[in-house]
Image: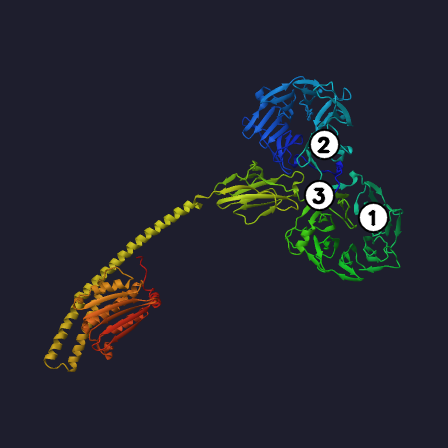
Amino acid sequence: MAQTSSPLRLSEYQKQDWQIEDGLPDNNVRMIAQRPDGLLLLATGSGLATFDGQHFHSLPIVVGGLADNEAINAVLPEGNDDLWIGTDGSGILHRTASGTVAISEQAGFHNERIRTFYRDAQGVLWIATQNGIERFVSNHLEAVAGAGMISGDITTPFAEDGHGGMFFITSSGLYHWQGGKVQRYRVGTSASDTEVAVYRDAAQRIWVGTMTHLMQLVPRKCALCGEAPAFDPVVRATLASPITTLLGDATAGNLWMGTRHDGVWRFGADGLSHWGSRNGLPDDAIRTLFMDDEQNLWVGMLTGGLSRWHKGALAPFGEPEGFHASYAANVFADSRGDLWFGTWGNGLFRRHNGQLIPSTPPGMPITTAIRALAEDQKGRMWIGTWFNGIYSYDGHSYRHYLLGNESPGNAVSSILADSHGGLWVGTYTGVLYFPQGQPDRQNRRQFVETKLITCLIEDRDGSILVGTSSGLYSVRDGTVSAVSGLPHPYVLSLVLDSGGYLWAGTKAGGIVAIRQDHAVALPGNVNAPTQPVSTATEDQDGHLWLGTYRGIVRLTVAELHAVIEGRQHPLSVVILGKADGMRSSECGGPSKPSSTLQPDGTLWFATTKSFVHTTDVAERLGTISPAATITGWTLSSDPDAADTDTRTGDSRIELEAGQPDILFFFNAKLLSNPAHVEYRYRLAGYDAEWTNTRAHAARYRRLPPGTYRFEVQARGGGEDWTSRVSSVEVKQRPYFYQTWYFAAGLCLVVLALATQLFRRRLQLMKGRIGIVLEERNRISRECHDTLMAGFAAISWQLEATSKLFRDSDLSSTPAAQSCELARSMVSHCQAEARRIIWDLRDADEMTNLLSRALSRVLEANPLQENFKTTFEVEGEEQPLAPGCVHHLVCIGQEAVSNAIRHANPSRILILLRYEADSLSLSIYDDGHGFQGSEENSSRRGHFGIPVMEERARKIGGTFRLQTSAEAGTEVTVKVSFNAARQSLRQEHHVIRWIGI
């Protein structure tokens, strides 16, 4: 967007004032300076303060352990923590990070009043005091004699001459110092025209302000002058008030002047300009002027506080600029380069070659409201009025046309000259179409009758879009069709962008895209504007500018297309308002068009308070890239209690356990318009996402223990997040019970308690088991001493009876057979009793290895020397549950016992074989066996085989018996591991864990 950068009128500068009620410590602002970090330093009647564009913070002066906010006349920053401070009674103070030193008091200059400081090219510090001029050289303070006192209204007393000398001002006038010699240097036009200010600008020009004049010391070429510089005073301007301060503008070449009683003056290429209390300046007594690194002009006044002037992205055009119209209606840039301004009640104006020309058509009442402006392909201007028809202007003369429907209740609300030469006129009762390009009652057509027309536009396909108060319509080849999907029927504006997208603004707010007779709304999460859009215009750089009821919004056309097509989120939005140069943030109205684009790229908008246009500053919107800094933090919920020391990225904040709040403060240096800065912050390690804000603080409550990093980033309106991230590390200390060593200690304590409980339970269970074993032994003794003795006695009696039967040849009688059966049963019961007693007295430890249990049983057999016993194990042994081992051992023991008692073997083989998913236990003897019919011997008093079968079934196994007469016997038990585990689980309800 190429725009001219002609000097702004003083009225076009955007101005903002601060006084005590806005936070300024004192309305008497005596000097303004800027620290390297961008903060302003303000010397006031109530001490020193900093200013970031939005907030003031007092900067206490601590000398000798005492804080004093006495009046400060001057301040010279040479670092963020290196300040030279001129007080109004304590002389020179040098404040550094290590403390504040009273320079004047140490040098013996007591109760001095400092006027200002100046650091020359050789590094010498010059000081103006009420007692005269002083120099601080090589840590030594010395007075410059012979010049006199300096009054308090002299604030710009130093200017280097470019030859190693110094001009300075005292109450007696202008002096020149050269090589330690001081002499009076008169330049005033009269004795009463005393010099009161001297200044050297960036162009090395030396300016002198007197009681009534601005003078320039022009270097003189003088062969007889030697090395001493010679100057000719030249009067550049005459003023009505003494000059108090001078300031040069390096970029524009202007010289700014503050006066004692007549406000601010500017001397530049456009001559002399003035701005005072009659124009809105709070005070005509100017104490100081300062230009910051953003080219903002700061004005410090005697009683009016602080004022900031800057060239905004927008500049107003109204009464102060020479446009004497009470209410702006519409604006239009024609093809000739002229700019047309329509008003409500003040007629029509045309700006031609920079001159504003009243252009109300002859015969039209001056009070007629201008409702519509347009230009056709022939270059004719068309002017629509409220109820006075329309006018055309061909560059030479006007012509008046009546439409036949003129009345106070009707108006020409919009005019469009289409690409085919036709003329469209929107009214309160529909739209009229004149195919010949000019009004003709005999050759016209009317569309959308009875509708109040608000705006007209031609689409790329030649169709005409008609906006009304009750919907949007498309007229194509004489056919009218309604556009559906509008969020509100009242259409305020229409615009066709360079990419062919048509956009409509309605009373619902924002804009919608019109695609194939249907409205497509922007998604709600793309940061789109929500205010009603009364006008829209695209610039030469692909930006769409929207005039709304709350300012002017700039969007990027390419981003809008991407959003509609679902390719991008969100939009880069720039919002401009009163802080950017608008006198009113309300744009547009019923008249069309209320915005336009000039060939040089300048955009114009009609507002409720005159017109406004873009400046060259608008080109830099979105390229500011302010950098955020963390300015401080506080543990209090009161923001005023903040620690304002700047924290660097390597600093660390440690919070005590249980700290309820921490409040971070941050800022970005943008003194011209800090409201444009947007921030985002997060606490890394705590926040999952960034938080966007326009505030300057972030609060966190009750952080969990841990180490975090607070990060903040800034951007200007419409920018991407590309600036550097400022951060500070935060450590939240835990309570004792939240520490790792507390948790570890607690685990150790729990482990120790568990171990102790386990040991106690183990001892208890061992004691209980000891009792059980003792009881088992007692039962076995009782059984052995009573039951076994009884069985033995019965066995002896039966044996004796059986012998009697045999001796008397009665062995075949039923009684003898019954006695033999009883003797066999008693013998079996004896064997079973012996086995039970053996089980009860078996005190060896339980085992889950079957081979070990079988070996122990075989070794305990007292009859094994009468035959050969072989025990073999094949495969990798698997541990079994003790219950399963017990049943298998009992089966093996029973099989061996049966072989010993009945088979008279010479060899017994016990084979234990482990397979992948099962085991088998085989007991083979080479005895004389028995017939298969004898297997069911339980009927005759033998129960060994059924018991073995029952035990095998109990552990989920299979029992197999192979025998024949004189061929030995083989007992085999096969058990799968899964069946053994299943049977064990079924018995868990009766086998309780006892902790061993």
| In-image side of 214 versus 644 (left or right) | right
Query: Given this view, does label 3 or label 2 mark the residue nearer the observer?
Result: 3
Q: Position of residue 472 (x, y in %)?
A: 75, 58
User: In the rendered image of this protein, does residue 873 appear above or below residue 83?
Assistant: below
Q: Position of residue 411 (x, y in %)?
A: 83, 53
Question: Mark 3 vs mark 2: which is more N-terminal?
Answer: 2
User: In the rendered image of this protein, does residue 199 appear above or below residue 648?
Assistant: above
**In the foreground, 711 or 49:** 711
**Which residue is labeled 2 in the image?**
283
Query: Given this view, does label 1 or label 3 mark the residue nearer the observer?
Result: 3
User: In the rendered image of this protein, does residue 268 appear above or below residue 839?
Assistant: above
Mark 2 lies on a secondary structure that is: loop
Q: Amino acid at mark 3?
A: Ala
**Which residue is labeled 3 in the image?**
618
Dot 1 alpha-carbon crowd within 10 angstroms: few under 14, some 14 to 19, many 20 or more = many
Q: Position of residue 674 (x, y in %)?
A: 65, 40
| In-image side of 901 versus 689 (left or right) | left
Residue at 85% from the left image edge and 53% from the top image edge: 407
**Which residue is labeled 1 in the image?**
369
Question: Mark 1 vs mark 3: which is more N-terminal?
Answer: 1
Mark 3 lies on a secondary structure that is: helix
Q: Amino acid at mark 2?
A: Asp
Q: Quadrant of the C terminus?
A: bottom left
Q: Residue furthest front?
A: 223
Write down the quadrant of residue 647 in the picture: top right
Mark 1 lies on a secondary structure that is: loop
Residue 872 visible in image? yes
Residue 388 visible in image? no
